[in-house]
Image (spheres, grey):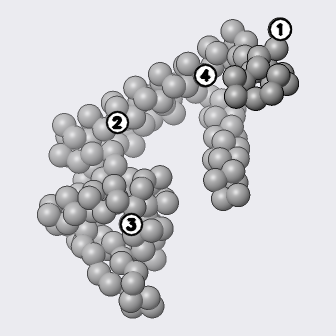
Amino acid sequence: MCCVHPESSAEPTAQPRWLTAKEQRAWRAYMDGSQRLADYLSRDLQANHDMSLAEYRILVLLSESADSSLRMSDLADGVLSSRSRLTHQIRRMEAQGMVERSNCVDDGRGVLANLTPEGRRRLEEAAPTHVESVRRNFVDLADAAQLSAVAEVFEKVDATISRTESE
């Protein structure tokens, strides 16, 4: 039986490609597990280091960049955040002394987020706790082949969505 969109002429539309039981199991396990893991990692960082997972990700990206600074737009892309959400996050982190903003020398309109010594200290303090939590709750639960499969699948997901969004 075909579905007809109410606003179309009476031409049939394609049926959805419903998930099989196996596909649905994988999808739901991913959704539930990834949300539970992200929530757990964030609570763990908050309880042990008074830092959210979002703050940790920002500090990591800044620490890995040249001169420990990034344009705000590049940082927003790196942490998969809207520019306005990142601006609010950076303001809170500035108040805690973890980052500071400065004008981009190359482009007067651009703004840089810069990792401060306090931000680096907080990151270095939190990293062992975070890495151990990631290892215990994700990495150690899979063998090398499973980890490779997860990486390959989500690299494809990222590339597909990035390509679609840029069209």
Question: Could one spot residue 51 in this view of the protein?
Answer: yes
Residue 146 x %, y %: 65, 29
Q: Secondary structure at mark 2?
A: helix
Image quarter (top left, top right, bottom left or bottom right) of the N terminus: top right
- What is the CA distance from the residue labelled 3 to the residue labelled 2? 20 Å
Q: Secondary structure at mark 4?
A: helix
**Front label number (3 vs 4):** 4
Could you say which is closer to the camera, residue 118 or residue 88?
A: 88
* The label number, if any, that marks residue 1 in the structure image: 1
Residue that appears at 69% across and 51% down: 164
- What is the CA distance from the residue labelled 4 to the residue labelled 2? 21 Å
Residue 39 x %, y %: 34, 32
Horizontal side, residue 104 vs residue 154: left or right = left
Q: Residues within 10 Å of mark 1 (few under 14, many from 20)?
A: few
- What is the CA distance from the residue labelled 1 to the residue labelled 3? 56 Å
* The label number, if any, that marks residue 27 in the structure image: 4
